[in-house]
Amino acid sequence: MITRNDILARVKHLPSISNVIVKLADLLNNPHSSAADFEKIVRNDPALTANLLRIANSAFFGCPREVTSVKQAITLMGVGRVFEIAASASFMKILPETIPGYEMNAEMFWLHSMAVAVLSEKLSRELKIKTPDLIFTAGLLHDIGKLAIASYLNDEKDTIMQEIKVGGKALVQIEKNVLGMDHSEVGLIVAEEWNLPPRLGLAARYHHTPDDLPEKQDCLLADLVHVANCLAHMIGYGSDIGEMHRVIDPRVMERLKFKVQVLERVASGATSEIQAMGELF
């Protein structure tokens, strides 16, 4: 069985997320920070500035006019959205070539992560309520625990494949049985170590089991990521082991008041957007 200390040691050996993202996350967590604080950090990173302006002008983010400066991007999009773009660009750069315990390569993992990000945001729009802060990033980073747990999972590959063949268990159950922790639990640890906003860690921790979130009034982010994750697998963006055990929790569907027709409409219109966003970053 792996321990929290084992995971912490492995997290420290993961490629480090950009210091700029850590600084921006600190600002997001600080109620006294200002837009000017965000602008100063972003402007000091030429590569991030170029990426921000390129991505801000994409169709997905839909700015009402051309974005030509960091200050304008922050004014039009808000500090949360700027953080999301920066975090997405940084996350893409640290992905390993393969995620061995899950039989995935970097491209598969990235497209699945992007699919969940895009679908989470599209689903939130269907609710016709204010889109939750950082919903795109919550979708993108929901599986960060897999990066830290993959090698442990690979070491137990024979046992895990046997469990899958027997059937009846989701991969998170098998991870828990074999390793003592599943990738959603590890995701929270990684988010904390990276100093990400707490709600991103909670979305990663409860994206398979949103009904277990202690504070039910804060479950919207986890609910949306949960549904988006299942949808992503259903439309072909996710091909790791244990593929067929993704089932949308009916309690989540009831809370969100989603109907099957809504999910079908969102899923059918998402493929081209997912591909475009995957290539954009």
Image (cartoon, rainbow, N blue to C red):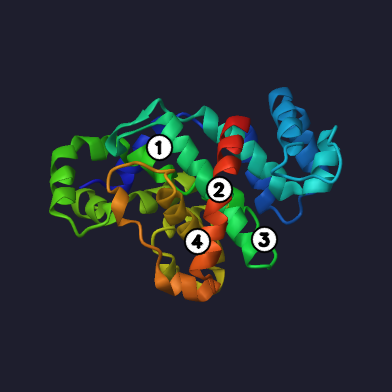
Question: Earlier along the polypeptide chain: callout 1 or callout 4?
Answer: 1
Horizontal side, residue 234 vs residue 135: left or right: left
Compared to 235, does 148 lie above or below?
A: above
Question: Measured from the top left, where is residue 209 in percent x and y?
Answer: 39, 64
* Residue found 56% across the figure and 37% down from its top: 275
**Residues under labels 2 and 1: Cα distance?**
23 Å
For the residues carrying marks 1 and 4, which lies nearer the camera in this image? 4
* Residue found 63% across the figure and 32% down from its top: 280
Question: Measured from the top left, where is residue 143 in percent x and y?
Answer: 43, 46
Is label 4 in a helix, a strand or a loop? helix
* Residue found 48% across the figure and 76% down from its top: 254
Horizontal side, residue 70 vs residue 11: left or right: right
Is the C-beta separation of discs 3 and 4 under 8 Å? Answer: no
Question: Earlier along the polypeptide chain: callout 3 or callout 1?
Answer: 1
Residue type highlighted by circle 1:
Val
Residue type highlighted by circle 4:
Ala
**Residues under labels 1 and 4: Cα distance?**
23 Å
Compared to 35, does 110 lie above or below?
A: above
Identify the residue under disc 1.
11
Question: Earlier along the polypeptide chain: callout 4 or callout 2?
Answer: 2
Identify the residue under disc 3.
131
Is label 3 in a helix, a strand or a loop? loop
**Residues under labels 3 and 1: Cα distance?**
31 Å
For the residues carrying marks 4 and 2, which lies nearer the camera in this image? 2
